Image: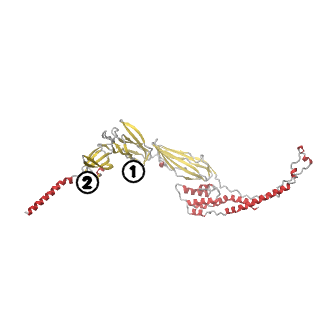
């Protein structure tokens, strides 16, 4: 009896568990409901679309969007949630919004997206071939063109992009063409141009952007599509919409353009390949006409202007130097002038020319071969030869010879006038009107001896005052001559170490101490005071070139050190006039 009751209790318990599982099974098996829809279907191959996935509750896991990448490019990805209260009931949903760009035309399918064990439905999608855009239906579209389609290698190609917008846009961007490394160079031209046009009765705002493309290899070259990305205002859904519509993310892609790049023509014989509309040469001297002198620099400027090439494409062309002249080039100046029609490159090269010999200097003709892309033939830009006279260099001005001091002036015993001779005959006094001699009363004036004594005393007082003043000036002069001055040891050590900057500093320090005013403040000022074409002047010019040339060549101080003897000569000549003046004053000081 007891066993029978126990079996009934166990059966009832088992039945209860089964009923409980049956009641809970719908809740366990029921997951989130996920809907999927697109903003338009069909869609053009060059336009993006928007895919929205919406779940009525939290799904089982995170979404896996990798199946989309087979036929679509994922342009954007955003997630959001929405809560609504309807008739007192709370409804919550979660959304995933993706921007997609079809990779090809045809009948495609947006695959089901897995959210853990939950899945969205798949969507069939028709992608039509991107032909000529129909302005009657498109709100945003792109047009591109390239000129010429068959350029030479490194020739300028003008690539034009036009963006048409019939609707308001926000956060709009326009990409630039991108090429693999080594295929082409691209430069954006002048500012964008904006205009309004009408097509099939619709008004479009047009933004035109231009690029200069330079193919770097011959053969086929494809200019990849450019893309517009932004938010486009959608048509309002009803007249009660207070915001006038909503924005949706949109991307529009242009067509690609294929170029056939030609190689360098076999009949081109120039040294530098320059395909351009026009190439010109120009030159100028700092002084017009230049005046050449041995050892003195004259600056020459050579300019290359090319319409259709960048300054970086222009070659390094300098003035050919004849024998008997040295040149020190400056760093070239490069400038690109960008307009809507293309790029005009300018390269300027300055050269300091220093003649080494007297006579005549002749510069040969300058030529530059280039390829005229308008006439499709080779042309040559020319500058005529030039010939100038070279004057002799001005040697270091020698100091005037030391003149012997003039002997001391003899001191007269008195400052009395020489006696006036007596008339030789009585007729000498027969002046007109028998006038008496006016000097006769002066000679017989009784106060004359006292006046002579007074003048003699004044002269003695003046001489004594002069002698005392000279005695006070002598110690100052002696103290100045004993001031220590730097020697050439520091300069020789800098030369031995091949220290260009140290040599310059030591040289300026030495000249400041030994040379009279005005003291040179730079190397060129020192060189100008030396004999033109001398070994020291040439060595200082080489030092100046090593310090300030863009190439910063290695410098050796051997040549400058061996020519330092000229500095002692210049210093002795420069200081000699001061000693001569002192020697001329010494006889007066001793009196």
Judged left or right of residue 49, residue 344 is: right
Judged left or right of residue 339, residue 537 is: right
Q: Position of residue 181 (x, y in %)?
A: 40, 51
Q: Earlier in the sequence, mark 2 or mark 1?
A: 2
Q: Quadrant of the C terminus?
A: bottom right
Q: Quadrant of residue 21?
A: bottom left
Tell which of 357 and 57 is nearer to you.
Answer: 57
Q: Residues within 10 Å of mark 1 (few under 14, many from 20)?
A: few
State the CA–CA distance, disc 2 to disc 1: 43 Å
Say what secondary structure mark 2 lies in: loop
Q: Residue at x 69, y 62 (%)?
A: 476
Nearest-to-viewer mark from 2 and 1: 2
Residue lying at the far top in this picture: please name it.
201
Q: Residue at x 76, y 58 (%)?
A: 406
Residue lying at the far left in this picture: please name it.
1
Q: Position of residue 214 (x, y in %)?
A: 43, 47
According to the picture, the residue beneath numbered tag 1 turns out to be 180
Q: Residues within 10 Å of mark 2 (few under 14, many from 20)?
A: some
Q: Which mark is residue 60?
A: 2
Q: Quadrant of residue 533?
A: bottom right
């Amino acid at each position: 009896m007891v066993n029978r009751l126990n079996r009934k209790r166990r059966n009832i318990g088992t039945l209860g568990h089964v009923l409980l599982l049956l009641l809970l099974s719908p809740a366990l098996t029921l997951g989130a409901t996920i809907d999927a829809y697109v903003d338009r279907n069909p869609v053009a191959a060059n336009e993006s679309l928007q895919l929205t996935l919406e779940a009525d509750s939290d799904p089982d896991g995170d979404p896996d969007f990798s199946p989309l990448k087979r036929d679509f490019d994922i342009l954007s990805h955003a997630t959001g949630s929405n809560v609504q209260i309807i008739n007192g009931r709370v409804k919550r949903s979660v959304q995933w919004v993706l921007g997609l760009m079809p990779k090809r035309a045809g009948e495609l399918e947006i695959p089901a997206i897995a959210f853990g064990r939950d899945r969205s439905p798949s969507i069939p999608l028709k992608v039509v071939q991107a032909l000529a855009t129909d302005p009657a239906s498109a709100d945003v579209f792109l047009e591109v063109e390239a000129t010429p389609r068959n350029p030479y290698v490194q020739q300028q190609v003008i690539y034009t992009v036009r963006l048409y917008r019939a609707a308001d846009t926000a956060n709009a961007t326009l990409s630039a063409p991108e090429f693999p490394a080594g295929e082409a160079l691209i430069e954006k031209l002048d500012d964008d141009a904006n205009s309004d046009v009408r097509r099939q009765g619709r008004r479009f705002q047009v933004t035109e952007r231009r690029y200069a493309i330079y193919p770097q290899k011959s053969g086929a070259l494809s200019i990849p599509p450019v893309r517009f990305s932004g938010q486009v205002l959608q048509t309002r859904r009803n007249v009660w919409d207070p915001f006038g519509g909503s924005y949706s993310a949109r991307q529009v892609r242009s067509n690609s353009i294929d170029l056939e790049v030609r190689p360098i023509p076999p009949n081109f014989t120039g040294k530098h390949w320059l395909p351009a509309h026009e190439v010109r040469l120009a030159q100028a001297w700092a002084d017009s006409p230049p005046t050449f002198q041995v050892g003195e620099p004259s600056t020459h400027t050579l300019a290359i202007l090319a319409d259709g090439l960048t300054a970086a494409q222009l070659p390094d062309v300098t003035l050919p130097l004849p024998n008997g002249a040295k040149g020190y080039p400056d760093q070239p100046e490069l400038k690109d002038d960008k307009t809507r029609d293309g790029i005009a490159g300018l390269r300027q090269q300055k050269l300091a020319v220093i003649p080494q010999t007297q006579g005549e200097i002749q510069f040969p003709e300058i030529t530059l071969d280039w390829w005229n892309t308008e006439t499709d033939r080779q042309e040559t830009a020319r500058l005529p030869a030039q010939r100038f006279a070279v004057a002799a260099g001005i040697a270091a001005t020698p100091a005037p010879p030391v003149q012997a001091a003039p002997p001391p002036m003899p001191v007269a015993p008195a400052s009395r006038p020489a006696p006036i001779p007596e008339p030789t005959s009585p007729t000498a006094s027969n002046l007109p009107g028998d006038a008496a001699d006016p000097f006769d009363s002066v000679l017989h004036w009784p106060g004359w001896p006292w006046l002579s004594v007074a003048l003699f005393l004044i002269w003695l007082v003046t001489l004594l005052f002069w002698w005392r003043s000279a005695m006070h000036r002598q110690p100052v002069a002696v103290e100045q001559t004993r001031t220590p001055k730097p020697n050439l040891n520091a300069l020789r050590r800098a030369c031995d170490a091949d220290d260009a900057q140290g040599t310059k500093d030591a040289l300026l320090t030495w000249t400041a101490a030994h040379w009279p005013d005005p003291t040179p403040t730079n190397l060129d000022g020192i060189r100008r005071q030396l004999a033109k074409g001398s070994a020291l002047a040439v060595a200082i010019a080489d030092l100046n070139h090593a310090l300030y040339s863009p190439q910063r060549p290695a410098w050796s101080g051997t040549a400058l050190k061996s020519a330092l003897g000229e500095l002692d000569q210049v210093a002795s000549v420069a200081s000699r006039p001061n000693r001569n003046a002192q020697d001329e004053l010494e006889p007066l000081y001793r009196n």
